[in-house]
Amino acid sequence: MTDAHAWPVLSIYQSGIDTHNATFETEVPDWTAFGTSRLPHHRFVALGVDPSPRLGAVPSATTVLGWIAASPTSKRPAYRGVVEHSVYVRPDAAGRGVGRRLLEVFIASTEAAGIWTITTAVFPENVASLRLHAGAGFRTVGTRERVAQLHGRWRDTVLLERRSGVVG
């Protein structure tokens, strides 16, 4: 993921926000804030042919179909091998294996860097994300009930983690 991907990445993020089932965030941050809150070596985009091209557009495999990025779980040294991640796929690219491929590349990247645990929190209503993560070896750790409000409604999140089989 580079600065050249800013607009499509933030646009995909906005699509996730608009579902009300992807994040507690209600506004997309600017690109600088987005980048500084995520680890630079564990940010990836999936490129492919636009699934919804404009009439007359020439197909090209340069469209951002999804992204994945990690943030540190804690600044404390004991947690240096634990990250929290987010993965987002364009709605019109859902079900095409984009999320699965992003997770594969991401897991390989984190394991190569010595990261032993990847975590995430998913709304229980986001069944597709729960399935995606289960297929990538994530397990349910628990549920945080009524952890925060989104648009005035208390929401739960399912805590997931994946422990590395090669690190730790």
Image (cartoon, rainbow, N blue to C red):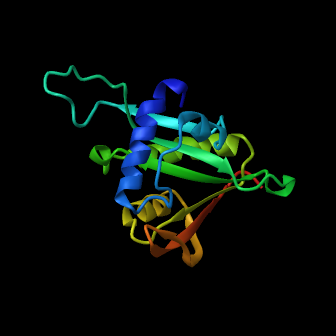
Decide which of 8, 66 is in the foreground and name it.
8
Judge from the rendering whether residue 159 lies leftward or rightward of residue 125; answer left or right: right
Residue drawn where x is 42% and y is 63% of the image = 131
Q: Residue furthest bottom?
A: 145
Residue drawn where x is 35% and y is 44% of the image = 90
Quarter of image, res 93? top left
Q: Position of residue 68 (x, y in %)?
A: 52, 44
Judge from the rendering whether residue 108 lies leftward or rightward of residue 112; answer left or right: left
Judge from the rendering whether residue 89 lies leftward or rightward of residue 45; answer left or right: left
Residue drawn where x is 45% and y is 65% of the image = 130
Q: Position of residue 117 (x, y in %)?
A: 68, 57
Q: Which quarter of the image is occupied by the C terminus?
A: bottom right
Q: Position of residue 5 (x, y in %)?
A: 47, 29
Query: In this picture, is 157 found above or below 68?
Result: below
Q: Residue furthest right?
A: 77
Quarter of image, res 62? top left
Query: In this picture, is 107 found above or below 23?
Result: above
Q: Residue furthest front?
A: 152
Number of numbered callouts drawn? 0
Residue drawn where x is 54% and y is 60% of the image = 137
Judge from the rendering whether residue 77 lies leftward or rightward of residue 124; answer left or right: right
Quarter of image, res 82? bottom right
Q: Position of residue 17 (x, y in %)?
A: 41, 54
